[in-house]
């Protein structure tokens, strides 16, 4: 990642712990592109955990859901530190733009589709993944037209990960009402509908911007 104009506004970027981790990473041979690639691995594990959670008993299901939530958050940490190491630590590479975007789209699909299969709703998982990718497409379309990067919600990347992570943890309570996968199903509906609304909102903002440009 190298383009500071295409960075999502994040309050965590200014925290002491984030800067300390960035300094540590910058002192190693780890590159921003490697951190970006690691986000795919984290997402793949999260997606696999979601998928397998729908095929196991209560005890192992709980372990898998907790792991899924943890690796979703690890994915976000990778997304945070690839940019910080690239920009703040000055270790950006010529191909950083590719590694800034491509792993994120793969990660969205792995997590949403994995959750869809785990919930027994694969089509819903694919729908959530498709609309998640569409939000990023509209943002990049806007940038290609000269519009500043639009990271508006209501279901931008950090919102999607918050919803699916919370759903994973709330699913641990389903035995209390003899439920199974309803929480994940509702979460995927929220992501799919919210991401579709986000894509439409960004598209309308882009059209309005182009008309007054």
Image (cartoon, rainbow, N blue to C red):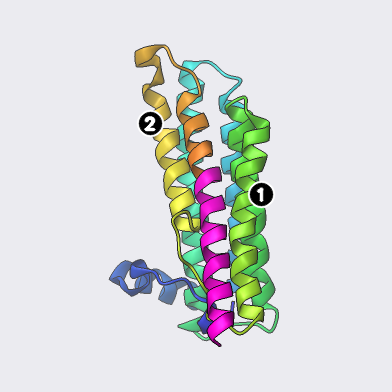
What percent of the width, then of the height, locates residue 73?
A: 45, 51
What percent of the width, then of the height, locates residue 40?
A: 63, 54
Residue 25 seen anywhere in this rendered image of the structure: yes
Q: Residue at x 59, y 69 (%)?
A: 139
Towards the viewer: 71 or 27: 71
Give me the disc on residue 130.
1
Towards the viewer: 102 or 22: 102
Give me the disc on residue 170.
2
Towards the viewer: 138 or 163: 138
The magenta span reads: 192-213
Towards the viewer: 95 or 38: 95
The answer to whether residue 210 is magenta is yes
Q: Residue at x 53, y 81 (%)?
A: 148
Q: What is the crowding at mark 1: few (fewer than 14 residues within 10 Å), some, or many (at least 20)?
A: some
Task: Looking at this view, name the residue that lies furthest to the front.
Answer: 211
Type of secondary structure dominating the magenta stretch:
helix
């Amino acid at each position: 990642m190298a383009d500071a104009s295409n960075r999502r506004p994040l309050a965590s970027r200014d925290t002491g712990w984030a800067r300390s981790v960035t300094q540590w990473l910058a002192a190693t041979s780890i590159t921003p592109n490697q951190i970006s690639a690691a986000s795919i691995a984290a997402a793949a594990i999260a997606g696999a955990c979601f998928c397998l959670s729908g095929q196991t008993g209560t005890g192992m299901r709980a372990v898998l859901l907790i792991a899924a939530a943890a690796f979703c958050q690890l994915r976000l940490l990778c997304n945070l530190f690839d940019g910080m190491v690239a920009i703040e630590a000055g270790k950006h590479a010529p191909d950083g733009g590719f590694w800034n975007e491509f792993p994120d789209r793969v990660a969205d699909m792995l997590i949403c589709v994995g959750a869809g299969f785990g919930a027994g709703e694969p089509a819903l998982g694919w729908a959530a993944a498709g609309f998640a990718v569409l939000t990023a497409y509209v943002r990049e379309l806007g940038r290609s037209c000269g519009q500043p990067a639009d990271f508006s919600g209501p279901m931008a990347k950090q919102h999607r990960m918050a919803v699916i992570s919370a759903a994973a943890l709330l699913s641990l309570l389903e035995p209390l009402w003899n439920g199974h996968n309803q929480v994940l199903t509702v979460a995927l509906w929220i992501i799919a509908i919210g991401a579709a609304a986000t894509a439409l909102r960004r598209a309308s903002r882009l059209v309005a911007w182009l008309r007054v440009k």
